[in-house]
Image (tube, grey):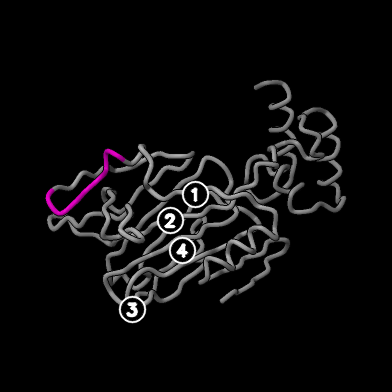
């Protein structure tokens, strides 16, 4: 299933097929970044039936992972008995389960497999605090969820929108765009006065595409204005 919404120059696409999600990333020219929780950065939060090793956060590949309490990994929530991420239940201070990530760089897509202990749970993915996808999980095993937002985002938040289940996640596929250097609005791999001139022309009304817009929106407030010009000049001056 693919759903498409347009908000100005932004496109929001949702998927329940990993193959379709990957094909769309390829057609849009995005590169991918994988997080499967198998790397050494996660070794200190490995749990099993005998012990729980958890942490309030884990940093890996430029992303800060957090949850409603602590986060940990075990093979119960992973795909094919690999490591999967979840928040361990605390009977003393129970709270609503969620998984959250904050990225140092702009992401353009997120795809993952989610498994819930409540068949048919309505799992939602929020991008920068906006509910961007919600689908019911399968009655057994993992369900794939994918979202592409061509406007970009830096925060994602996953929860059961009805707050009735616990869940785990695995095998994240993020869409990234290494080709966009913030401030390099003419894409010559340099940030200089030529970018300032072009930025001013955009502000005065010259048409811009989504990539020029993304490179020029230095303070990431979704608007190209004099504040971005000031920030660009500051970058050029080395401040």
Residue at (59, 74) in percent of width and height: 2
Whichever of labels 1 and 4 marks the residue nearer the N terminus, that label is 1
Label 3 and label 1: CA atoms lie apart by 26 Å
Q: Nearer the viewer, residue 31 or 159?
A: 31
State left or right for residue 159 relative to residue 193: left
Q: Which residue is mark 4?
A: 125
> What is the crowding at mark 1: few (fewer than 14 residues within 10 Å), some, or many (at least 20)?
some
Magenta span dominant secondary structure: loop
Extreme residue toward the front, this view: 80
In-image side of 102 versus 142 (left or right): right
Between the residue at mark 2 and the residue at mark 1, the CA separation in whole angstroms equals 7 Å
- Mark 2 and mark 1 in contact? Answer it, CB < 8 Å: yes
Q: Are marks 3 and 1 in contact (CB under 8 Å)?
A: no
Label 1: which secondary element: strand
Mark 4 vs 2: CB contact within 8 A: no
Question: How far apart are the two marked residues, 1 and 4, measured between alpha carbons?
Answer: 18 Å
Tell me the residue at 31%/69% (across/down): 116
Tell me where the magenta segment starts and ends, as one range. Answer: 43-50
Circle 1 sits on which residue? Answer: 34
| Camera-nearest residue between 97 and 77 | 77
Badge 3 or badge 4: first in the primary sequence: 4
For marks 3 and 2, the one nearer the N-term is 3
Within 10 Å of disc 4 (Cα), the crowding (few <14, some 14-19, many 20+) is many
Res 139 label: 3
In the rendered image of this protein, does residue 205 appear above or below residue 190?
below
Disc 4 versus disc 2: nearer the observer? 2
State which tag comes first along the sequence, 3 or 1: 1
**Residue 168 pos. (x, y %):** 32, 60
| Residue underneath mark 2 | 171
């Amino acid at each position: 299933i693919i759903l498409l919404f347009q908000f100005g120059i932004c496109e929001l696409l949702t998927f329940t097929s990993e193959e379709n999600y990957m094909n769309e990333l390829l057609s849009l020219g995005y590169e991918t970044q994988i997080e499967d929780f198998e790397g050494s950065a996660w070794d200190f939060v490995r749990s099993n039936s005998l012990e729980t090793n958890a942490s309030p956060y884990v940093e890996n590949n430029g992303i800060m992972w957090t949850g409603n309490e602590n986060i940990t990994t075990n093979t119960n929530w992973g795909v094919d008995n690999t490591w999967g991420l979840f928040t361990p239940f605390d009977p003393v201070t129970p709270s609503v389960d969620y998984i959250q990530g904050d990225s140092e760089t702009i992401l353009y897509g997120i795809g993952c497999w989610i498994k819930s202990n409540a068949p048919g749970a309505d799992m939602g993915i929020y991008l920068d605090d906006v509910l961007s996808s919600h689908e019911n999980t399968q009655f057994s095993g993992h369900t794939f969820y994918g979202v592409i937002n061509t406007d970009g985002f830096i925060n994602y938040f996953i929860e059961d929108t009805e707050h009735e289940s616990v869940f785990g996640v695995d095998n994240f596929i993020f869409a990234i765009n290494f080709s966009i250097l913030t401030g390099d609005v003419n894409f010559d791999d340099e940030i200089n006065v030529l970018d300032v001139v072009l930025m001013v022309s955009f502000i005065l009304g010259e048409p811009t595409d989504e990539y020029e817009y993304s490179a020029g929106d230095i303070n990431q407030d979704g608007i190209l204005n004099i504040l971005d010009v000031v920030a660009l000049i500051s970058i050029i001056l080395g401040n």
